[in-house]
Amino acid sequence: MNFYWFVFGCVIGSFLNVFVSRSLNKTNFISGRSHCDNCQKNLKWYELIPMISYIIQFGKCRNCLTNIPNYVFIFELTMGVAFLEFRPCNIINILLLIFIIILQIISTFDLLTFQFSSYWLLPLLIIALIVTNLSLLKLLTIFIIYFILLALNRRYSMLGNGDIDLMILILIVFGFTAIIHVTLIASLLALFFAIFKKQKIIPFLPFLYFGTLIVNSGGLIA
């Protein structure tokens, strides 16, 4: 059964990649054939198998040999992992999966454009408040911390405001212990990425997303 959840998650991840790509290109993401963004050649069915097509084609378009972005493979894989971690067998897991799906969407937008629409934060907040186990006092404390972090960030520009928003939402959903581990892992991954890419400015949301999946799979969610 785990295998089927993983495969289904990879398919969803592939769809999310198409959704983000077509949203940025302002094209209809429901209708229309999938095609190579470089040569515009329509893709065959065997070129659309999540993860497998990428591996068989060595990460390149079969027609023009243009490199397929690495994130396509990575986000298909991570969504497969997400469906393994949060099997949609009950309402809480379904809500958590929706939370993770939205998190992946905005992570992809952040990776490609360094920004995302704030409209995505509302469903995340609603889900967070539904599934949280935190008391009202702790929630009030979190929101006070949130506004303090925003004020500090406005002065010192440590992170993007969207990064802080997501950290607070992850904190509400998964707890204090989890966000510490998530932030540490995300920071390490971001550091390695910055060194490898030799970039001074990098998107942080994807690493918060990866950190959340890693922490949950490692049983560190409290």
Image (cartoon, rainbow, N blue to C red):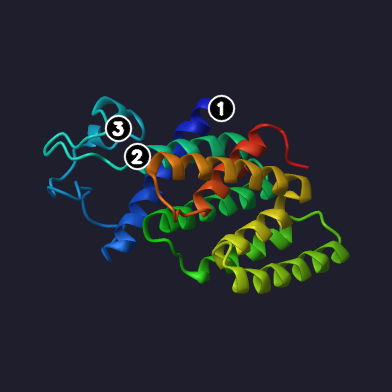
Compared with residue 45, is residue 157 higher up or lower down, i.e. above or below?
A: below
Q: Nearer the viewer, residue 134 or 47?
A: 134
Q: Identify whether 44 is placed above or below 123.
A: above
Q: CA distance from mark 2 to mark 1?
A: 25 Å
In front of the other: label 3 or label 2? 2
Number of numbered discs: 3
Where residue 84 appears, x then y in whole percent?
A: 57, 34
Label ID, residue 2: 1
> Secondary structure under badge 2?
helix
Alpha carbon distance from label 1 to label 3: 22 Å
The amino acid pointed to by label 2 is Asn
Kindly identify which residue carries mark 3.
54
Q: Is residue 96 left or right of residue 109?
A: right
Q: Is residue 204 among what the camera can see?
A: yes
Please tell me the numbered disc located at residue 70.
Answer: 2
Residue placed at 19% from the left, 46% from the top?
36
Mark 2 or mark 1, earlier in chain: 1
Work out whether residue 1 can be spotted.
no
Q: Position of residue 26 (x, y in %)?
A: 28, 66
Give the quarter of the image for residue 13. top left
Does the residue at mark 3 contact the one at mark 2 (Cβ under 8 Å)?
no
Q: CA distance from mark 3 to mark 2?
A: 9 Å
Label 1 or label 3, whichever lies nearer to me, is 3
